Amino acid sequence: MTLSLKATTPEVISFDEETLKIEWKDGVISEFALSELRRRCPCVVCRGGHGGKVGATTGNIKDAKLLSFSKVGRYAVNLVWGDYHNTGIYSFDSLRLYAQGEEGDLGIP
Ligand SMILES: [Zn+2]
């Protein structure tokens, strides 16, 4: 599935205690449960090493708080979690696919 540039470019990113919200440039609004995103952290450590599966070491996390985020170029967002875990880079492509219920770097919803 090919996503348009507008579909993978955020207009506004915000978060609260439980949800990360992205308003995309194509007008779609996606809301992500923070605990789900934390469990699906795509970084190498959370996947249990190179080639490991998303959720390998984080599958049991029950809740998560977000401290802050920063954009990584035009393609991704870096999330800083309440436990100070900050190596997860979530690409906008993978977030949009996940929001649409499709398999991407964050796995199958
Ligand atoms: Zn991680």
Image (tube, grey):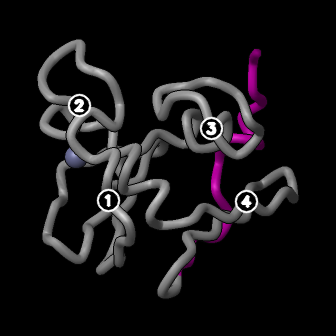
Check disc 2 and report its element: helix, strand or loop. loop
For residue 5, above or below residue 66: above
First of labels 1, 4 by sequence position: 4
- Asked whether 28 or 11 is in front, the reply is 28
**52 to the left or right of 101:** left
Q: Quadrant of residue 4?
A: top right
Which residue has dot 2 on it? Answer: 47
Looking at the image, do the residues carrying marks 1 and 4 touch, with CB atoms under 8 Å apart? no
For residue 76, above or below residue 36: above
**34 to the left or right of 22:** left
Disc 1 from disc 2: Cα separation: 14 Å
Q: Measuring from the top left, give residue 18's x and y in whole percent.
A: 52, 79
The residue at the point 64 percent across, 56 percent down is: 10
**82 to the left or right of 92:** left
First of labels 2, 4 by sequence position: 4
Looking at the image, do the residues carrying marks 1 and 3 touch, with CB atoms under 8 Å apart? no
Mark sitting on residue 61: 1
The residue segment tinted magenta is 1-15
Check disc 4 and report its element: helix, strand or loop. strand
Check disc 3 and report its element: helix, strand or loop. loop
The three-letter code of the residue at mark 4 reads Ser
Task: Select label 1 or label 2 by which is in front.
Answer: 1
Q: Measuring from the top left, give residue 26's x and y in whole percent.
A: 85, 50
First of labels 1, 3 by sequence position: 1
